[in-house]
């Protein structure tokens, strides 16, 4: 099975800094000493917080030849991922700054994510412009986050805003300054688990606390489900008609039945949320996208194809690999498992339309 | 199949409290008749969504599509809201306001002559289902 002739847009890779103190050159002077003193523990994690059963959730075969952490070398990731699979654009969602959804010092979070953004723009986008950045924001301070978004409006290499999930659902008014800035700059909002969800009171909770690692991963769609419902019923896309949102690494097979239920409850209770003016599925088709990884594995793959049809995957689904994590999807395997009539939409055109001309791949055809 | 439409007496105007459905068995169908500020209306007592007894629901209005956080009430006393899932239908037409659902409630013509209220219902035809 061949990749689409345009190549592949990968909506989820995780570049890593070998040591987060690499951000110090990008940090304002008054914050340097603070970060040097604390040594920048990015995530408030107990070693026993869902320990990865195999020791390390990063693919050990992605450790660069000269050592360091997996996906810490843009040259090696290029050899391993971009070149062999014909990936023409890879969206970077760095995990280290995303963990600020567990930080209590909001100003420190704002400063830290800004510095990490600069690091990845210089060392990855600057190395190969196929690497594009979803700039991380610290959504605990929506006014500062909105200002940061506006500052990235014209930055080459920036194609989206990565918003870690905090303790408020996405339809909350708390996020309105962020959405206004996203709409104004035309930058889509992308969401992705950070690892703090369910394990830290400042990050979004699960319904109950799962015990083991696999239990947690199996539950990740729950977070996206809650937020999709919230975005719809709060009328977010009526308030912000140019806003775009992508749920990355939350899977997609849960979406069709979720939409049936959302639509039915809108029909039942429209009179109580009159600002939801249209059937919810219409907002999703226009504003919301989902990604392939981790591709669910029913015993009969035709079941997955049926779900893709129900999801209208020709409009809503985008390819993602999740390189270099243990559960990443090999692009050629995903190519094989996405039916041919959907392949160019899923692997290229939908993401091209979603991120737009900032990808540097011309004018989207959709 | 041609259907004869026959008038069926459903009481006098004095029998009708405002916005209160009265339910009759006519030609094998359960039919609700109601008087509102706008006149008399009759509907099949069956919600087209899930078969609930629609005329056991409230005569009401609804919030019009509006800007976020704003409520604009309209259709005052022009709708019936199903007692089950809350689907709303216009008493006059059976349509779902705002196109919320494509399903449509069945309505019948009502006429008032010299204080007598009559609903016009097609005669039962063999094989027909209400």
Image: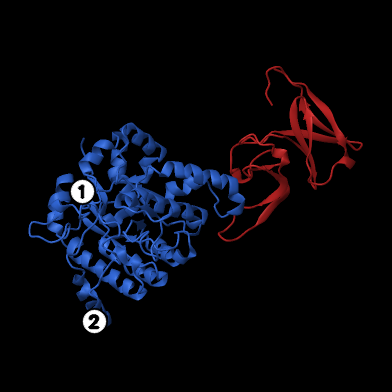
Chain colours: A blue, B red
Residue B104 visible in the shown view: yes
Task: Name the side, left or right, on which A117 lies relative to A177.
Answer: left
Tags 2 and 1 on a common chain: yes
- Residue at left 35%, top 33%? A303
Q: Nearer the viewer, residue B71 or B28?
A: B28
- Residue at left 52%, top 44%? A263
Q: Position of residue A357 (x, y in %)?
A: 30, 55
Q: Given the image, what chain letter belongs to the residue carrying mark 1?
A: A
Q: Nearer the viewer, residue B36 or A49?
A: A49
Q: Secondary structure beneath disc 2?
A: helix
Marks 2 and 1, how far apart at CA? 40 Å
| Residue bearing mark 1 | A87
Q: Secondary structure beneath disc 1?
A: strand
Q: What is the crowding at mark 1: few (fewer than 14 residues within 10 Å), some, or many (at least 20)?
A: many
Q: Position of residue B13 (x, y in %)?
A: 88, 40
Q: Nearer the viewer, residue B101 or A199?
A: A199
- Residue at left 91%, top 38%? B115
Query: In the rendered image of this protein, does residue A353 appear above or below residue A141?
Result: above
Q: Position of residue A231 (x, y in %)?
A: 47, 55
Image quadrant where residue B1 sits: top right
| Residue bearing mark 2 | A33
In the orientation shown, which residue stands out farthest toward the left? Answer: A66
Q: Position of residue A150 (x, y in %)?
A: 36, 68
Q: Given the image, what chain letter belongs to the residue carrying mark 2?
A: A
């Amino acid at each position: 099975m061949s990749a689409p002739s345009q190549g592949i847009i990968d909506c989820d890779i995780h570049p890593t800094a070998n040591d987060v103190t690499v951000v110090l050159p990008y940090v304002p002077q008054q914050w340097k000493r603070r970060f040097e003193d604390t040594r920048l523990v990015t995530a408030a994690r107990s070693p026993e917080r869902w320990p990865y059963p195999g020791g390390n959730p990063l693919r050990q075969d992605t450790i660069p030849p000269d050592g360091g952490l997996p996906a810490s070398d843009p040259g090696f990731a290029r050899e391993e991922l971009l070149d062999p699979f014909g990936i023409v654009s890879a969206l970077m969602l760095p995990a280290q700054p995303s963990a600020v959804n567990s930080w209590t010092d909001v100003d420190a979070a704002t400063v830290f994510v800004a510095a990490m953004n600069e690091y990845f723009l210089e060392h990855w986008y600057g190395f190969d412009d196929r690497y594009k950045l979803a700039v991380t924001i610290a959504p605990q301070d929506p006014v500062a986050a909105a200002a940061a978004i506006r500052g990235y409006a014209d930055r080459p290499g920036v194609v989206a805003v990565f918003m870690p999930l905090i303790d408020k659902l996405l339809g909350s008014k708390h996020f309105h300054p962020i959405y206004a800035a996203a709409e104004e700059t035309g930058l889509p909002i992308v969401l992705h688990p950070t690892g703090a969800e369910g394990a830290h009171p400042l990050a979004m909770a699960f319904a109950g606390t799962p015990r083991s690692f696999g239990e947690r991963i199996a539950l990740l769609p729950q977070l996206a489900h809650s937020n999709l419902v919230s975005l719809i019923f709060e009328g977010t896309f009526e308030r912000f008609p140019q806003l775009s949102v992508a749920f990355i690494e939350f899977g997609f097979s849960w979406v069709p039945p979720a939409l049936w239920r959302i639509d039915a409850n809108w029909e039942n209770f429209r009179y109580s949320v009159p600002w939801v003016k249209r059937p919810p599925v219409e907002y999703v088709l226009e504003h919301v996208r989902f990604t392939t990884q981790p591709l669910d594995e029913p015993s009969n793959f035709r079941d997955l194809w049926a779900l893709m049809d129900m999801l209208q995957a020709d409009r809503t689904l985008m390819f993602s690999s999740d390189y270099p994590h243990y559960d990443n999807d090999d692009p050629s395997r995903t190519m094989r498992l996405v039916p041919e009539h959907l392949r160019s939409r899923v692997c290229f055109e939908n993401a091209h339309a979603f991120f737009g001309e900032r990808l540097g791949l011309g004018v989207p055809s959709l | 199949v041609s259907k004869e439409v026959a008038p069926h007496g459903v009481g006098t105007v004095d029998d009708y409290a405002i916005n209160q459905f009265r339910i009759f068995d006519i030609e094998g169908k359960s039919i609700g008749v109601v008087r509102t500020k706008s006149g008399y209306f009759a509907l099949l007592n069956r919600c087209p969504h899930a078969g609930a007894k629609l005329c056991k629901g409230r005569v009401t209005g609804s919030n019009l599509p509006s800007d976020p956080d704003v409520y604009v009430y309209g259709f005052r006393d022009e709708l019936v809201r199903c007692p089950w899932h809350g689907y709303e239908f216009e008493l006059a037409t059976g349509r779902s306001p705002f196109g919320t659902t494509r399903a449509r409630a069945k309505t019948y013509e009502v006429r008032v002559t010299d204080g007598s209220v009559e609903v016009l219902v097609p005669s039962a035809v063999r094989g027909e289902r209400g």
